[in-house]
Amino acid sequence: MAQVQRTPEKFDVLVVGSGAGGGTAVHVLTAKGISCALLEAGPMLNPAREYKEHKWPHDYDHRGAEEGGKAYFGEGKPFGFFSTTSGGWQLEGEPYTVAAGSQFQWFRSRILGGRTNHYGRMSFRFADYDFKPYSRDGLGQDWPITYDDLAPYYDKAEEFIGVVGTTEGLRSAPDGKFHTPPPPRVHEVLTQKACKKLGIPCIPNRRAVITRSINGRPACHYCGQCGRGCVTASNYSSSQVQIFPAMRTGKLKIFDNAMVREVLTDGSGKATGVVYIDKQTRQEREIRARVVILAASACESSRILLNSKTKEFPNGVANGSGLVGRYLMDTVGFGLSGFVPALEGMQRYDTDGAGGGHMYMPWWLWDQHAKLDFPRGYHIEFGGGYSMPGIGSFTGRARQMGYGKEMKKAIRQGYGTNVGFAGRGEMIPNIHSYCEIDPNVVDQWGIPVLRFHFKWTDYEWKQARHMEKTFAEIIETMGGRVTGLSAAQRESDGISVPGTIIHEVGTARMGANAGNSVLNGYCQTHDVKNLYVMDGASFVSNPDKNPTLTINALAWRGCDYLAEEMRKGNV
Amino acid sequence: MSKLVQLEGIGRREIVRGLALALTSAGSLDLEAAQHVHTETAADKKKTGGVYKPKALTDHEYKTVSRLAELIVPADEVSGSGVDAGAPEFIDLLASQNAKLADIYHGGLAWLDAEMRRRNKTTFLAAAPAAQTGMLDVLVAAEREERTRRGEELVYQRSADYRNFAGYTTKRPGEFGPGVVFFDWVRRMTVDAFYTSPMGVKDIGYVGNRSYSKYEVPQAALDYAIKRSPFANG
């Protein structure tokens, strides 16, 4: 075996992963003059070459069906050809396994910026009560921090990345530092009116899109194509908003195609660096640093911890509690759509807007659990309008109609008359949902892979049924009729496949007690003082607030603390 | 021809400046690549004086697909046909890149001819228009019967969220099974080709993929929908 090559430079901080957590870490630390190495398992990102913003399907012979019509065989890119480079549910040569009786889909990104290049940009603060779930209903655990601890960092994160929204004064959806949101589209106004009748708040959405220029980034130009990657960086991605600017400080060195296998320790309880495989040469290399931050995504960071076994840490580094990999959570998802006759025959207008929904419904029954048969809650995202025609846009209508002039007419009439609703709800952490190292399987880099176990419980199923009832009520109140799922599908398919909402968090939760958690409130591991985990792994619960903004805020807070500890000489 | 940005509201120079700003942060500027997309079909057509030469389908198969594309999306008072929108080229090109897809067309078209011969002693292409639509009507009726039998609105696939997972399969027993399955292929690909073409985009009236300095929703559209909704009186 060839000798392990050691990179000669020693860095102050080594960050593994370049998504929301890693991007925030290098941004905050390099701004303080701290030198960082950033390791990304995928290649560098070149937005000019890779983003397909403003392209039309007819710019390509395959119209978006991809070469040989891959999309028709379910083999196309996960969110369609035009979505930005982002990874997928299965990566060639990097498998994961799922235990018998479980279902889990693990989305992984292998590109600078990770999933922030394509994500939905929903940016919701946790409510104050979200930090103390156990105290409220006896389920799960409380966080070791409060809303007030994190609020200044929500402020910083929002001000830096830029988020649209309005001040509403709702306890379930705390207000932030917002840019002016775009106005609601017609279907959003109708939905808002229906919600008003039903007593459901429907307010301007909070998304990481800027409507005034900040930090040299131009304001949104309303093409609605955030998911393709924004060439003007008018939405948040860690790559464009945090990492490229951090590179200009001269304090950041990027190691791309670097697949980290394990954290190195010195035998006296301190981390000294990591071992990674350089994917291009298949060489094993070492990088050393004073501090190691894992931000490789919740499950990938847990995998690294579990694979870092030494005499000192026989169950994996920082796993004295045995909780690394445990309490894996995703978001509860359910969707239903409806045909709204009021929209039929309306004049066409540009509904692209700022991309995604301009409005949403935050959870409204947070103080009425006595009347509900499930704990916690969900928010509602919804979409409609005249979207750019693409592969599959009218397949359903064509099948209904058969063929010919009547079909053509029906497609024209039906265009833009549907509104789709998606619930995003809180799962209760349970002991049946976790990831562990599969003892029999390695990936092509020789690194043992994860095996997933997952189970929805009645809490989640009942919540999904509440979503279904609510969405049907909204659709009917606006004079529409449900067209989404048939009764038979609802039975077999009435809740999202675990993992598919791509909000997988938990697996290295924070807590006040080292015996019952992996990290403290600053994302620092209890067992190894110079080892941090700054991605969704730290989550104690998974409120119905999409996780990215909270990952940003927790990482920012953790880095402020870390910089202070470094200054004091504690790490 | 690709339009990088359709300008409205803000000047082209501003957009390019914004782009350059974003791109230089990545350390590379490739506006040329971002602006021009060369298409194989266009290049091929140039060589043959504007005529597309099929790569995967035989001449007879290509003509049959063209006839089907014309029947599926016929020209009407608003726009042209599936053929005008390039559906046969789209189908042939993808089939030339994927043996599985090519087989679906070779086999499906052969079935269609065999069935037409059995009924009318001629190929689908050579049959009278009424015989052609008659055959499609039989396939659509068989498809509807199957859908009714299963009592489901969506027997084809799961909702869009789960598009990429192993979804529902279309199992249609009976003598028209292969024809129904094939017709669904040629229909969905023709419809896709039509509505993704500039002609189809114009037909349904998609007016987006532009850039603005401000986003506005026309009051007339709002008034129209509210007047027709249960909220007409508040």
Image: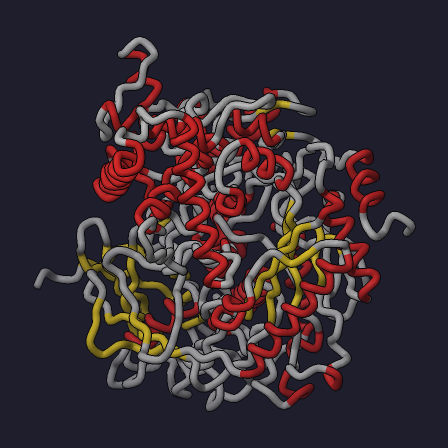
Note whether residue A256 is visible: no
> Looking at the picture, does residue A305 appear above or below residue A420?
below
Q: Residue at x 40, y 45 (%)?
A: A85
| Residue B84 placement (x, y as % from top left) | 45, 21
The mark tally for this picture is 0
Q: Left of A15 or right of it: where is B48?
A: left
Q: Place residue A298 in its image quadrant.
A: bottom left
Q: Residue furthest right?
A: B233
Note whether residue A52 is visible: yes
| Residue B125 placement (x, y as % from top left) | 32, 26
Q: Place residue A294 in its image quadrant.
A: bottom left
Q: Left of A358 or right of it: where is A335?
A: left
Q: Which residue is drawn at 78% across and 36% down?
A: B221
> What kind of colouring is applied to the model shown?
secondary structure
| Residue B159 placement (x, y as % from top left) | 50, 57
Q: Report the front residue among A369 and B87.
A: B87
Quarter that holds the C terminus of chain A: bottom left
Q: Left of A100 or right of it: where is A443?
A: left
Q: Residue at x 26, y 38 (%)?
A: B118
Q: Which residue is drawn at 42% across and 78% down?
A: A454
Quarter that holds the N terminus of chain A: bottom left
| Residue B68 placement (x, y as % from top left) | 39, 31
